[in-house]
Image (tube, rainbow, N blue to C red):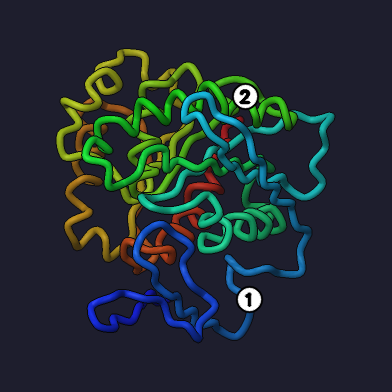
């Protein structure tokens, strides 16, 4: 999978002849996907498929209408209770990116058909809570999105679907900025989350920013699964500093976690698809 764009008279544009374009608030780009002899793990296959539903709700936090995508597994039964993964996008992305670019629903369908994962609901909210160009974006985004999660997103999901309404039944994960949301919000919200997937994210000063989590003497009792992952090429570049900062802090404080790098990709969808399919989703809820 390759990402590219054209630059014409200084303006970046997507390839007008390629319908595989990224739907983000960032400068547009196109995707080139080279398939093998058959469908890949992120493609639609001849297996039972779940449903993806778009919800639009009013937020008192942002004083406007917001959207939320929810995947329900094949054979969803309202008489059963399901764990919920809250899956977040990167800076500038829309919740639909995890569907159209990340293929999270097809990845989940294929894992379930292969018997490699447990049935779950995947909720994909809009974590673009404040514009990425706002001068105080880094200072405001975490507090505001935590309010959105607590006041609206989780209640909408719990009211609309049959969910396990406890920390053990909830996970939060995201890529890049969404990984930082998952880390900075999730690690201070152990009353609502017990499972975490930090994808292509971390922090270079975790002893300062995550001290409450790192120094909690009961943290290993509160966390069921903590995954930190990045792409092979990311580990060779500047993104690695944040990831390794987090991993080294977790090791220092003897916090149980899984670290993984693989997929041969960089800071792109080939990596995040790989991390979901090969590591995070198969190990999520394994002990439940």
Residue found at x 66% / y 25%? 164
Q: Is residue 205 left or right of residue 100?
A: left
| Secondary structure type for disc 2 | helix
Q: Is residue 145 left or right of residue 50?
A: left
When the figure is inspected, residue 113 is found, relative to residue 164, above or below; the finding is below
When the figure is inspected, residue 252 is found, relative to residue 268, above or below; the finding is above
Where's the C terminus, which quadrant? top right
Say whether residue 224 is visible: no
State the image quarter where residue 179 is shown. top left
Front residue of 260/192: it is 192
Q: Is residue 210 left or right of residue 41?
A: left
Front residue of 270/227: it is 270
Of the two numbered discs 2 and 1 in the rendering, the one whose residue sits closer to the viewer: 2
Residue found at x 82% / y 33%? 78
Q: Which residue is mark 2?
A: 155
Q: Which residue is mark 1?
A: 39
State the image quarter where residue 248 is shown. top left
Q: Mark 2 and mark 1: span between their CA atoms?
A: 37 Å
Mark 2: few/some/many CA within 10 Å (<14, 14-19, 20+): some
Where's the N terminus, which quadrant? bottom left
- Please give the label number shown on residue 188: none
What x and y, as percent, mark residue 116?
63, 52
What x and y, as percent, mark residue 157?
65, 31
Which sits earlier in the primary sequence, circle 2 or circle 1?
1
Residue found at x 55% / y 54%? 96
Q: Is residue 261 left or right of residue 147?
A: left
């Amino acid at each position: 999978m390759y990402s590219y764009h054209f630059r014409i008279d200084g303006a970046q544009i997507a390839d007008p002849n390629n319908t595989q374009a990224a739907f983000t608030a960032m400068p547009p780009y196109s995707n080139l996907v080279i398939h093998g002899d058959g469908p890949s793990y992120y493609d639609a296959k001849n297996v039972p498929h779940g449903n993806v539903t778009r919800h639009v709700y009013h937020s008192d936090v942002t004083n406007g209408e917001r959207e939320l995508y929810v995947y329900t597994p094949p054979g969803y039964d309202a008489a059963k209770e399901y764990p919920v993964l809250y899956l977040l996008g990167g800076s500038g992305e829309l919740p639909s990116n995890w569907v159209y670019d990340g293929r999270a629903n097809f990845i989940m369908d294929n894992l379930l058909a292969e018997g490699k994962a447990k049935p779950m609901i995947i909720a994909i909210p809009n974590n673009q809570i404040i514009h990425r160009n706002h001068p105080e974006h880094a200072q405001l985004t975490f507090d505001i999105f935590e309010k959105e999660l607590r006041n609206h997103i989780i209640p909408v999901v719990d009211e609309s679907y049959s969910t396990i309404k406890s920390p053990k039944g909830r996970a939060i994960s995201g890529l890049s900025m969404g990984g930082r949301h998952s880390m900075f919000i999730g690690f201070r919200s152990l009353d609502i989350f017990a499972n975490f997937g930090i994808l292509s994210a971390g922090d270079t000063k975790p002893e300062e920013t995550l001290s409450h989590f790192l120094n909690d003497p009961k943290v290993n009792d509160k966390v069921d699964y903590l995954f930190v992952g990045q792409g092979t090429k990311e580990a060779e570049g500047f993104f690695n500093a944040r990831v390794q900062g987090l991993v080294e802090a977790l090791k220092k404080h003897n916090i149980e976690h899984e670290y993984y790098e693989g997929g041969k990709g960089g800071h792109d969808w080939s990596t995040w698809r790989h991390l979901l399919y090969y590591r995070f989703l198969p190990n999520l809820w394994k002990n439940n």
